Image: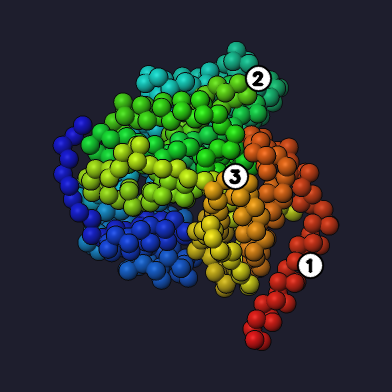
Amino acid sequence: MNSITKRKISKILIANRGEIALRVIRACKEMDIVSVAIFSEVDVEGVWIKKADECYPMMGDPMQAYLNYDPIIALAKKASCDAIHPGYGFLSENAEFAQACEDNGIIFIGPKPEHIALFGDKMASKIAMKRVGVPILEGTDEPITNKKEAAKIAGEIGFPVILKAAFGGGGRGMRIVRKADEFEGLFDSATQEAIKYFKKGEMFIEKYVENSRHIEVQIIADQHGNVLHLGERDCSIQRRHQKVIEIAPSPRLSSEVRKELLRISTKAMFKLGYESVGTIEFLVDDNDNIFFIEVNTRVQVEHPVTELISGIDIVQEMIEIAEGEKLKFLQEEIQFRGYAIEFRINAENPNNNFMPSSGTITSYLTPGGPGVRLDTSAYAGYTMPTNYDSMLGKLIVWAMDWEGAVKKAKRALDEYYIDGFPTNIILHREIVKDKDFIDGYLTTNYLDKKVELFNLNSEKSAKEEEERMSALMNFIERLKLN
């Protein structure tokens, strides 16, 4: 462990946008830290800009505004910022950026650059976790680019297999191959997608686990060697390998499997000397076998569900760890209560193969009441840009038991209304009415099996939603008149 120098942070630049930028600003406000926001030319109306203490434009390409880190670091220095918080996505798992912050005397609020680099390399992280006793899936030990060689290895492992971008994440550059004659075509498409998103086309191959549950463990570790867990989350409900709904804790995970997941996660991160927050992701098969997938070295999109069941502000803890502070609590002092569910609200059209949508929000009604949290930067009049991810925000609900959480979710989703372009709220309303969801039977192929049954493409669904919107619009007009 390196020598630790405590350094109080007084001003943070947030190298991100949207709801996560707003989330960090709120943490700064409560900690009496000055917040500095940045924005691209298409984000001039971003609500996080209005909430931050200071804000600065990043001119040029809208995507590069949040990816080109030299101007961001230069701005941080000019604005006298002590630290930079990367949020999630963009530069959050860029080891070179983290190192550049350190080299310029700026605190990077996140793990050490060497850990970001290790876990950003899927093969290296797999080998490292195996060495510290974490069970892994059968597959390749080195990245591979030769299609013929890869096909041979896949045949030896046995189909189905899954192809994964060796230097990627977030569901990009991934393909499930069930038959040998499909391999080469899917290998090509996975490689092309990996190059597009990560600039590297290397793949690795793993045995694919059918009917698995995607379970992840939230870790928090300070610079003094203290490593704790904040419980697990169930992220099984996915579409195209991207998470749609997240739950904490997992509704049908046995106490024995939960205990083992938490044990191996904390032990592994302690042995590797990890610092800051991180998420260790696993698959759990029908027989309760555990297999490591990857480590995410950043705050997760789904961190609110963990905050609601643990009572711990993960973003504030990140900042205090970066300052060199010790964790203020022991493992046994963390009390988990109830169930929380997060619904990712995306600007996409369920009636058109979930194609991303855009436009201006013309009418906007948000859910509220006990046990309801909404993390979003959307508002009436907000124009959804096409340059970034389609997520508008996250609706999170909490209740003391699973049944209560599902009922609260139904109520909150029924209150949520966005007009101006299609969203996936209608999909979430269908999911929470589904018997398997209500009973907690969730697997990674849940949506593959269910989407067609939800009749999202039917004229009836479209008509019902149109009638619902019309009724709500009439209600809004009556409110205006009163």
For the residues labelled 1 and 3, the Cα–Cα distance comes to: 31 Å
Q: Is residue 186 left or right of residue 455?
A: left
Give the residue drawn at x 70%, y 39%. 436
User: Helix, strand, or loop for circle 2?
Assistant: loop
Query: Is any atom of residue 221 visible in this view?
Result: no
Give the residue drawn at x 58%, y 38%. 251
Q: Which residue position is annotated with label 2? A: 159
Q: Position of residue 257 (x, y in %)?
A: 51, 26
Q: Nearer the viewer, mark 2 or mark 3?
A: 3
Q: Which residue position is annotated with label 3? A: 402
Task: Give the mark, 1 or 2, whose residue is nearer the N terminus.
Answer: 2
Q: Which residue position is annotated with label 1? A: 467
For the residues labelled 2 and 3, the Cα–Cα distance comes to: 36 Å
Amino acid type, mark 3: Trp
Question: Which of the 4 image quarters holds residue 379?
Answer: bottom right
State whether residue 325 is above or below residue 421: above
